[in-house]
Amino acid sequence: MLNLLNDWHVGARSAALAAALYASMGFGGGYADGRGLWARQPNAGLHLLTTGVLGLNVYLVICIAGYTHSGLEKGGRPWVLYGFALLVASSLLRASAYAGATSLLMGLAALAWCAAFGLQSAHMLPVFWRPRADGAGGCDG
């Protein structure tokens, strides 16, 4: 997975964010493998794979495809990066919870996760509830 990062041409924000997904897959797989450097905490890798990879994938698809199919430009949305950072933080907090302070770190991870999708909902739901900005119908374009 980490080798696939060589194929990304990082210049666009969405490409950089998608590259973070591959990094999460690589490190999560390394943890979940149960051998080598991280053999003591394979569940930490499962948290990286679920909260990191799955959560970031859903978040990015809604951000990118949601705007594309609404006829809007995808640039100039700093909240996307804030939510992305919250999801990465949530994933790292969950993975590190096995080192100690489990309840505190899991609680903070849950807050960060909910804050990211709450932020996305606040910005995306109005986009989904109104007609397309470009006048096209449905998922055209």
Image: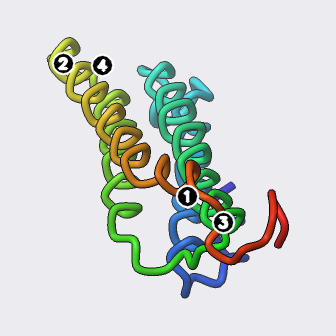
Q: Nearer the viewer, residue 6 or 37?
A: 6
As drawn, the label of residue 44 is: none
Foreground disc of the pair 1, 3: 3
Closer to the chain start, of discs 4 and 1, is 1
Q: Which residue is mark 2?
A: 100
- The residue singled out by tag 3 in the image is 132
Instruction: Name the residue nearer the viewer: 39 or 6.
Output: 6
Q: CA distance from mark 1 to mark 3?
A: 15 Å
Q: CA–CA distance between discs 2 and 3? A: 48 Å
Q: Residue 71: x percent and y percent?
A: 67, 72
Dots 2 and 3: beta carbons under 8 Å? no
Horizontal side, residue 74 vs residue 77: left or right: right
The residue furthest top is 103
Relative image position of residue 92 (x, y in whole percent): 34, 39
User: What amino acid is at disc 2?
Assistant: Gly
Instruction: Name which of mark 4 and mark 3 comes first in the sequence.
Output: 4
Of label 2 and label 3, which has the lower sequence position? 2
Q: Amino acid at mark 1?
A: Cys
Q: Is residue 3 above or below residue 29?
A: below
